[in-house]
Image: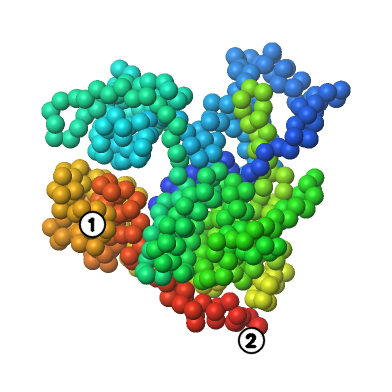
Amino acid sequence: MEKEKTKKTRLKFYLPVLFAAILAIGVYIGMNLNFSRLPESLEKKFKSIGIGRYDKINDVLNYIHNSYVDEIDREELEEETIKSFLRNLDPHSVYIPAKDFREFHDPLMGSFEGIGIEFNMIADTVVVINPIVGGPSEKAGILPGDRIVEVDGETIAGVNMSTDKIVRKLKGPKDTKVELTIYRHNIDEFFDYTITRDKIPAHSLDIAYMLDDATGYIKISRFAATTHNEFITAFDRLKRNGMENLILDLRGNGGGFLDAAILLADEFLSPGQMIVYTKGQKRPKQIANARRNGRFESKPLVVLIDEWSASASEIIAGAVQDNDRGIVIGRRSFGKGLVQEQVQLSDGSALRLTVARYYTPSGRSIQSPYDAGVDTYYDDFIQRFINGEHESQDSIKKQDSLRFETKKGRIVYAGGGIMPDIFVPVDSEKRTPFFNQVINRGLIYRFAFNYSDNNRQILSSAYSDANHFINDFSISEDVFNDFIEFAVSKGIKPGNNIEKSKSIISQQLKAYIGRNIWGNEAFFPVLNQDDAVLEKAMEMISQEKYKSVLTLNPDKK
């Protein structure tokens, strides 16, 4: 009875966060994770399927289209049919309509064409968070905090226009022009800009900086075509600054290109060491080994993962772990170990079909079971939270049949995701019901935006750069109390546990204020100041403790 009560408590605690996140997982994990293109030898075979055979599916579609009682859109019927039978295969085989293909393809290719801004929707208005450095908007004079009122003469502010539609209006082919009308805070006039669209880099590396005199930190948000080059640039800069140890943060990284993960892993492993191998019913085993001398093959390396780390992130973590190259810290990763090939269809749409599983060097399949169907597959992810897995490693069920060994004989497990070498639980004490409500409704971000918007000149004058802000700015008691009043005005009841959440709320307020003025350079370093996973990484990266983890195997005592 007590156990059931605990599960219900966890359910109440996590569901507000999970419902928002799980809604995106099916689309993101399916469409944005590692895939490869269809081999040229198979393209002709693909196009010829059905020739000389009875085409039952096409006959049925024709019959429905020609005879159904109501009007039928043939193209829509075909697309829904394709989506339906892909859903019965596995969770990650997907069909991408032609109208959506570029939207999903461009970010992984590392660039897109548009006006070059980062924006958020605030009170049904597009607000520029940052113009991308070197992009057309920055060159034209667009500033952080600007509101876009009109695009090509059409009002987009205050009219409940969808974000997708706004993005389509702002993006467009290189060298095309777009007319913007801008409102600038505290200035009683509108500004008109003519911006020529250009190719905009889409960065996959969020930030790279030194945590102390010897330890570098690099956070990668996804694996795109540009990831390896971004990593090299950041790594070389940190190396010049004295980096001897590296913490690679892959938390929240849902994957991307398989090749990008292999290139990155090659920087950490010696030539000949296995990174990953793939194998499928119709695909022979293919092995990817490290091929060249990497930049960081022997010095202390820690990889951070969590429940949102998937696919290409799991390849990196698995290769580092199985080769005893470094320590993996955090919580069990998502468990996406399927490889998709992509074929472009003649109408501009695309099919990403699962053709193989990938395996870590020890032979582990990372893929979580999906035999019971897609809904059960994602329900199992939610069940991890309810069962307390993110609060206690003991809640994770380990099967002897899924037990493997690293090169040095350390025990590792398959069965869905990468199990970290060192488990760090979610800090549930600070995440009170009040904190969950203000986070889920975006109130911390909205308050921080309003504060930085109203105090932009003061903050920019008082703090010369991001580092000055990080070191010297703090959320005062008055500002914190103003936030509580703001939350109450939005219908949130504070309750009796505000003090428990005060430090994490203040930290996030400061981080978002910093981001609105100085971008990621002020955002991630603030969030990292009170991060239990990162603190554990810093503790373990010392030579003595680092070596003990990679040689000691508690299961073999």
Q: Is 452 situated left or right of 100 in this image?
A: left
Residue at image location 40% in from the left, 26% down from the top: 197
Label 2 SS = loop
Look at the image and tell me whether residue 122 can be seen: no
Q: Which residue is mark 1?
A: 469
Residue 494 percent location from the top left of the image: 23, 57
Dot 1: within a 10 Å radius of its alpha carbon, few (fewer than 14), some, or many (20 or more) residues? many
**Pick the front one: 511 or 491:** 511
Residue at image location 58% in from the left, 66% down from the top: 297
Residue 541 percent location from the top left of the image: 47, 74
Colouring? rainbow
Q: Point out the image quarter for the C terminus.
A: bottom right
Residue 526 percent location from the top left of the image: 31, 59
78 w.r.t. 495: above or below: above
219 w.r.t. 330: above or below: above
Mark 2 or mark 1, which is nearer the start of the sequence? 1
Look at the image and tell me whether residue 55 can be seen: yes
Residue at image location 38% in from the left, 59% down from the top: 209
Residue 557: mark = 2
**Pick the front one: 116 or 51:** 116
Residue 69 percent location from the top left of the image: 63, 14
The single residue placed furthest to the front in the displayed view is 240
- The kind of residue tagged 1 is Phe
Residue at image location 26% in from the left, 32% down from the top: 141
